[in-house]
Amino acid sequence: MARTPIPIQPAGTKTAAFEYLTTKKDELVGWARKFSLFPYPFVTACCAMEFMAVSSSPYDTDRFGAALPRFSPRQADLLMVVGTVTHKQAPVLYKVYEQMCEPKWVMAFGVCATSGGFYQNYAAVQGIDKIIPVDVYVPGCPPRPETVIDGIMQLQDKIARSRHPIMTKDF
Amino acid sequence: MGVEIGLLQQRLAPPDYDVLSGRDMPVVRLPPARLLNAVTLLKNEFHFDLFLDVTAVDWLPRQPRFEVVYHFYSTRHFGRIRLKTAVTEGDPTVDSLVSLYGSAGYMERECHDMYGIAFRGNPDLRPILLYEGFVGHPLRKDYPKLKEQPLVPYRK
Amino acid sequence: MNTKSPEFELPNPVRPAFDATGHDDHVIVNIGPSHPATHGTVQIIAELDGERVVRTDVHCGYLHRGFEKECESHTWHNLIPYVDRLNYVSALINDFAYCEAVETLAGVAITPRCRHLRTLLSEYSRIVDHLTCVAAGLMELGAMTAFLYLVMIRDYMYEHIADLTGARVTYTYGRIGGLARDLPDGWLARLEAILDQYEMFVGRVHGLMDRNRIFIDRMRNVGVISTADAIHWGYTGVILRSTGVPRDLRRDTPYLAYADLDFEVPVGINGDNYDRYYVRMREMDESVHMIRQLMDSLPAGPISVDDHRFTLPEKHLVYTEIESLINHFKLVMDGPQVPAGDAYAAHESPNGELGFYIVSTGSGIPAKVHVRAPSFVHMGGVHRMLDGYQLADIVPTFGSINMIGGECDR
């Protein structure tokens, strides 16, 4: 009487229970991270005016948990590149990005950071995504504060959706 | 208000100087060798104590190629004056005004950066608006606008 | 992504003037360019003896966006957005100074209503600029409340200007020969309401700051510059007036409608940070006084001069008449043909003398547009105000100079 062999799972595959727990863990960590963003305002140009406006009343970013700017890259997790990045500034931006610890996100605030804006010449970097990876692009020259808040909310959705590994293979 | 053009023409006489009454202010054309002399005169006798601006115009393909333009203002009689001097591409050198005006330092650095005009006597002609390692002078007409010289290599 | 060392060596974009101290006890510190207190992006390499600054080397240029090169490949009208983004806190003044330079070269006289409106909006921009400068300066000293008051008024002004021009911060509102559009209904009434609220908020800031012992201790006799030094190093505007000389282009060589207005030119006593703060506060009050006079005396009439060489024809004519269509087409595609020559026009911007030197070869595209940027010239002499003071004084001194990156680096 032949019996069908019971398939034995190879080591390392995850069971359904494990997947459920990690999903819930990701949701919890994502919820915590998205509502406590510490922006590093890498401010260069005119968009700074709208950054100041969006941080103050009536467009307050404190409502989203992103109020307190941290002026040290070691303590920040959201790099807001506000304004044009020129080739002279590029090593500085790269260095600041490298100094930030995981998890970190980058917001390209304004068209100059997104794509160089209308400065298409020898001096401006045509979009900071040529140098560092960007998570959310906020267009506008400069963007209205409502656009910035929309960008922050979309970033929050992105953080909530993404996986948050607590232990990586390098750690 | 302003300075009498007749007085200027007396003190800055031809053949070296050419004093005209321009659309908005008196304009003096002179050779580069007479620049320091003329500016000292303007500062001491005509009280042009505020040095506003130095810049250059690239007249490629006309020769002499560059025209260095100076603007001065007087806080005493509120007059303005423009000085123009022409230099060639082969020897784009003029005398520096740092001995007369402190504000000349940064402005001459910028003119050197953008056009390559050498200012004899300025101790510090490091790049100010451009960065170390930038080759060329971008405001010259033969520098292509889109030619970027990145310092950080692009991703991917 | 891990924090491992980059595969390439990050180059240093600047060469410091000194990299060895003259004294064993001295330390060299790099401040900026990405720093909360450097407005915009400026690098200061300072040699320190304990807390005292011995010498500084200031590096600007981190925001050099190639304004002059861009201008040489756009028509005279198309480059007005670039002009806006020079001094981006008071963008209208840049527009009007540039338009005046082109109008001087072209021999175009603007209409009386345009002259009055340009004056009114210049003063409005001046208030916005001074609000931003004072607010940022006070925030860096720790006075968050004053910052929030002033930025709130500034936000009302931004929304109000957006009603007129369509944008909050950079407007592209000036046109050669006039303005883009006329005032909407109710704009002046809202202006009156904003000015009343302004007086209330600024009164509160005066109460918080003027006789505040901490504020006086931090700002009095800090960052002092003498009149002779100021003129030698090319300072104009608020910094020159804070040393005691009442030099103001609006009074000395009046332009636009300033000759008809009654206003004072506030001056300081000492040339220090406190004087610059107070001169700015008083200048804002004078600007409000000027705006009220202009609101009362605003003449009726057309906004733009009726000159087919520069002003776009009315839309309904463009759609019905062939001449207007061709005129519109030529103006947009080729640009207004400005006669050959050069011109320099200077306005009193909140920072000082803002001058535009333009060179034309007779076509619709400029041969050169050069900005005499007050912030750039001021950076040349800022070391006179930083050396000898303390490290913590760099922050308010630099804030009181109001270095705007877009204008400094162009």
Image (cartoon, coloured by chain):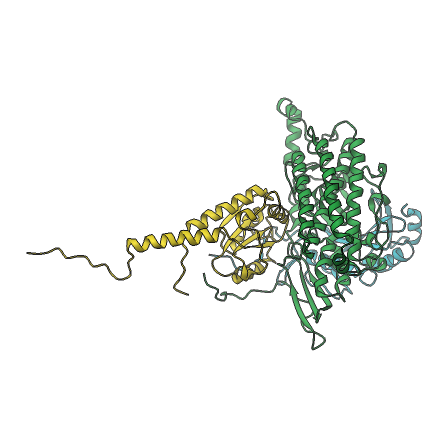
**A106 sits to left or right of C34:** left
The furthest residue to the left:
A1
Q: Is residue C404 visible?
A: yes
Q: Position of residue B23 (x, y in %)?
A: 83, 42
Quadrant containing the N terminus of chain B in the rendered view: top right
Q: How many badges with numbers are in the image? A: 0
The residue drawn where x is 66% and y is 48% is C148
Locate residue C222 relative to residue A117 in the image: left or right: right
Q: Could you say which quadrant of the image residue B114 lies in?
A: bottom right
Residue C274 or residue B67, whichever sits in front: C274
Q: Which residue is more in the foreground, A28 or A161?
A: A28
Kindly indicate the quadrant of the structure image that contains residue C21.
Answer: bottom right
Residue toward you, C392 or C12: C392
Q: Colour of chain B?
A: cyan
Residue at 83 percent across and 59 percent down: it is C232
Q: Colour of chain C?
A: green
Is residue A126 positioned above or below C328 on the image? below
Give residue C262's position: percent from left, percent from top: 85, 39
Q: Residue furthest top?
A: C320
- Give the quadrant of residue C9: bottom right
Q: Position of residue C104 (x, y in %)?
A: 78, 39
Is residue B59 among the parts visible in the rendering? no
Q: In this structure image, what is the colour of chain A?
A: yellow
Expressed as whole percent of the image width and height from the top left, the position of residue C128 reads: 71, 44
